[in-house]
Image (cartoon, rainbow, N blue to C red):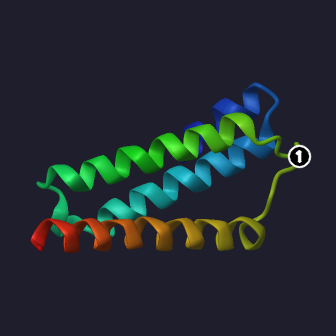
Amino acid sequence: MLPIYLAFSALGLVGKGTVAACAVGTLILAVRMHVDHLRLVWFWIVIVAMTVVDALLVAYVPFPNKNYTFPLVAPFGYLEYLLISSCVRLADKKTKA
C-alpha cells in the first residue's frame, strides 16, 4: 500500500493516494479472507470487477488534497470489504445452485 500512496503523493495527489492505498489494502484483505475460493474463476472475476470500480472511483472522484487519517478512511474500507464479501457470497451461492 505504501508504494501506491507514495506514487500519488509524488504527483501531488495526497488525498487520492490515501484512498487508493485504502482500496488496495481492502482488496488484499478480501483476497486473504476468502482464501478458500482462490482457485475459482468467478472469485477472480469479482476481485477484478471491484478493482476496476476502485480505479474508476479514484480516477474520477475529486478527493480533496488532504492526508486523511485512519479513522476517516477506515469506515469506507470496511464498507468496501462488506461489499466484496457480499459479492463473493452471492457468486458462491449462484454457482452452487
Please tell me how many numbered marks the rendered image carries.
1
Given residues 31 and 93, the one toward you in this image is: 93
Query: As drawn, which residue projects farthest toward the top?
Result: 11
Type of amino acid under label 1: Pro
> Residue 19 in the image: x percent, y percent?
68, 50
Q: Residue at x 54, y 65 (%)?
A: 80
> Residue 17 in the image: x percent, y percent?
70, 42
Name the side, left or right, on which 63 lies relative to 54.
Answer: right
Q: Residue at x 65, y 30 (%)?
A: 7
Name the side, left or right, on which 3 lies relative to 85.
Answer: right
Residue beneath disc 1: 64
> Residue 67 in the image: x percent, y percent?
82, 51
Tag 1 secondary structure = loop
Among the 4 quarters of the image, the one containing residue 69: bottom right
Query: As drawn, which residue projects farthest toward the front?
Result: 97
Name the side, left or right, on which 95 lies relative to 62.
Answer: left
Q: Residue at x 82, y 40 (%)?
A: 62
29 versus 78 height, above or below:
above
Q: Residue at x 58, y 71 (%)?
A: 79
**The C terminus - image quarter:** bottom left
> Residue 47 in the image: x percent, y percent?
36, 51
